[in-house]
Amino acid sequence: MLFRKPYFPALSWAVIILILTLLPPQALPKVPDWSLTSIHSLAHLFIFMTWAFLLLTGFFRAATSGKYNRIWVTFILAVSYGALIEVLQGLMRLGRQPDIVDIFFNTLGALLGIAAFFLVKKFFVKEPLRAAK
């Protein structure tokens, strides 16, 4: 079941992503114009890197199917979720605009999150990941 404890951090972060990316632009903090593109892109990269890391951690803690399946499912979910958010931004008429560059940085963030997971697992985790009880 998807709502088990191992998935709680990833599900919580997914809700935060949805709220932040669908808020009207007036509700977000103002950023200087000269840095809007880079900060905006880095924000997408960071939030999807974090989400992919949390999601993959949940898959490993839940001991779902094989290692490569977990990686692909994480990647496909992250890319699909990022694309869905961009579609919703276009459909909901809240002052947000869909942007292919956002999808690119979401995808890049997902890849970095997956890589970060394995780096952390290799260098900092001494025992196998297990489900929280």
Image (cartoon, helix red, strand yellow):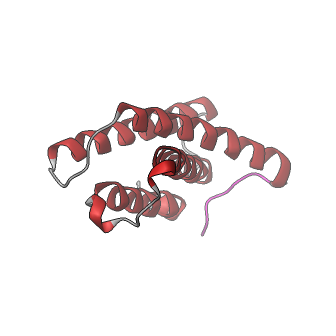
In the rendered structure, the answer to whether residue 67 lies left or right of residue 2 reads right
Of 35 and 29, which appears nearest the observer?
A: 35
Residue found at x 31% / y 45%: 85
**What's the magenta region?**
127-133
Quarter of the picture holding the C terminus: bottom right
**Residue in the image at 42% along x and 33% along y:** 101
x, y percent for residue 2:
41, 54
Residue 107 placement (x, y as % from top left): 49, 34
Would residue 121 be found to the left or right of residue 94 on screen? Answer: right
| Residue 24 position by quadrant | bottom left
Residue 97, relative to residue 29: is it above or below? above
Q: Magenta stretch containing residue 38, yes or no?
A: no
Q: Nearer the viewer, residue 130 or 16?
A: 16
Where does the image place residue 80, in percent across and percent down from the top left?
Answer: 37, 36
Is residue 7 depicted above or below 133 in this figure? above
Q: Would residue 92 appear left or right of 66 to someone viewing this image?
A: left
Q: Is residue 3 visible?
A: no
For image coordinates 60% across by 49% down, the residue present is: 53
Q: Position of residue 65 (x, y in %)?
A: 55, 37
Looking at the picture, tell me which residue is in the foreground, 101 or 82.
101
Q: Main secondary structure of the magenta part?
A: loop
Q: Nearer the viewer, residue 99 or 8?
A: 99
